[in-house]
Image (spheres, grey):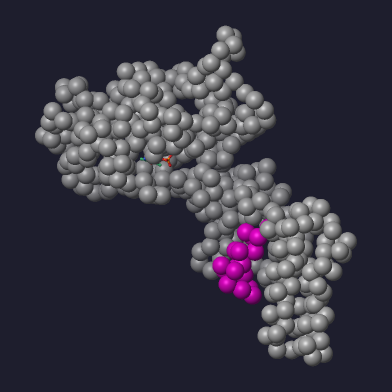
Amino acid sequence: MEKKDMLRQIPGVDTLLQEPDTVTLCLRYGRQSVTAVIQEEVARVRKKILNCKSQEEGEALLMGLRQQIYMQAEKKNSSSFQRVINATGILLHTNLGRAPFGKRQMEAAYQAMAGYCNLEYELEKGSRGKRQSHYQDLICQVTGAEAAVAVNNNAAAVTLILSALARNKEVVVSRGELVEIGGHFRIPEVMEESGSILRETGCTNKTRIEDYRKVVTENTAAFLKVHTSNYKIVGFTEAPSVEELVEAGKEYRLPVIVDLGSGVLVNLEKFGLSHEPTVKEMLKKGADIVCFSGDKLLGGPQAGIITGKKKYMEIIENHPMMRAMRLDKCTTAVLEATFREYFNEETVWENIPVLKMIGRQKDELKNQAEEIRSALWKSGFRGEIQIQEDTSMIGGGSLPGETLSDFSVSIKPEKESTEAFAAHFRRQSIPIIAQVKNNRVFFHMRTIFSEEKEIFEEILKEVLLSGECL
Ligand SMILES: *Cc1c(COP(=O)(O)O)cnc(C)c1O
């Protein structure tokens, strides 16, 4: 067949639109959207035929046109936001949404979204209520704080605290704590944005309490301590304790603000992790204000939680910027549900997924890996597959350099590059995100929930047995 004849064989847009399969597509996705896909695909096939080298190639393009239209229409209309399976071994993966929710947290979100709610309404009195009322007392009970406020994230919390308490005034920070957290959160820049003036003191590795005292003037508004959550300075180091800072703060009548980063409320040492200061500890030691993220080790929604002395919380809560940073109904509901879980010190380890993952035992992880391998073998997979002891990380800028023991299943692709191989898993109905290293693709067990195991196996089988890649 000549190219000319092949081009003539491409069906017209109107013809395609009248075919029963296309009519069904139009009913589902709308005529306008499907017409656009058809036009694009017809143009694409035309161009490819003009450039193709063999008759077979041209015929294949003609044959595949309808299938392409169908696939493109589906793709264009499928949701961009998707659930994924995290096989990276990074528990708080910022790119994958940080902390996953448990049943009661999800139920709270669903209830908040399903209709109207009492977000700012007092049911007893039948009058206007306070949005913060749903969790303020709970946070105080769980952390021992006098008062609490929540905003959209911890970056917002730090900005708000500084704007409310230190605008046009100096805030003293150690040179060892001028932190950058991923995504452009840099302490010096946040301070500038908040209108406060950074007064650096001490050295990168060593800062003593005298260094803080030395730089206090009548224009000093606060001492700020930033938890170095995503790096460690090791070797010849020194930093004043919170107690020392509090003592100096009292002397000069200056509040001590602590940006804790990750809001840990429980003790993680029993899992071999080093001590991470808890919110309760910081407040008990006398810090005036402690702020932390909702979606790091707390295991809740994206939020910034500010706790501390009532007199400061009142100033913060009444600051005009508060309005621009307030939580929506969905986050409010999930935040309340999260703090409720912490009332029960035993079930919290089961009900907050991040804590549950941290608590998973090696035997369980090994079994899960073996079950997955057996399932693949049973289904006829004959490729090379290994189980190995591995490590996972907390991530999300928490506990840098520390690992949790783990087991992983790894596969070495035979036909293609490791990157191309890993990409197959990301294209599935529930994408699987794996780790690529040493020419192998690793699936970490600790971050694959036991409830996900079966669907994980199904997807693995689908990719590995399709013959596409091995
Ligand atoms: C993570 C972190 C932040 C930013 O918190 P987000 O909730 O991500 O905005 C700020 N400060 C420290 C010390 C952190 O670890």
The answer to whether 170 appears left or right of 328 in the picture is left
| Quarter occupied by residue 211 | top left
| Quarter occupied by residue 217 | top left
20 is higher (above) or lower (below) than 122: below
Viewer-nearest residue: 333 or 62 = 62
The answer to whether any part of residue 269 appears in the image is no
Residue at the outermost right position: 20
The answer to whether any part of residue 92 appears in the image is yes
The answer to whether 320 appears left or right of 197 in the picture is right
> Which portion, as a residue range, is magenta?
412-428
- Whether the magenta-drawn stretch holds residue 419 is answered as yes
Residue 69: image location, x then y, percent: 76, 66
Residue 216: image location, x then y, percent: 14, 31
> Which residue is at 44% across, 33% downward?
325
459 is higher (above) or lower (below) than 50: above
Q: In which quadrant will I find the N terminus?
A: bottom right
The answer to whether 333 appears left or right of 285 in the picture is right
- Whether the magenta-drawn stretch holds residue 66 is answered as no
Residue 307: image location, x then y, percent: 38, 25
Viewer-nearest residue: 173 or 55 = 55
The answer to whether 20 appears left or right of 183 in the picture is right
The image quadrant where one finds ligand 1 is top left
> Which residue is at 41% across, 49% downward?
183
> Which residue is at 63% across, 48% downward?
83
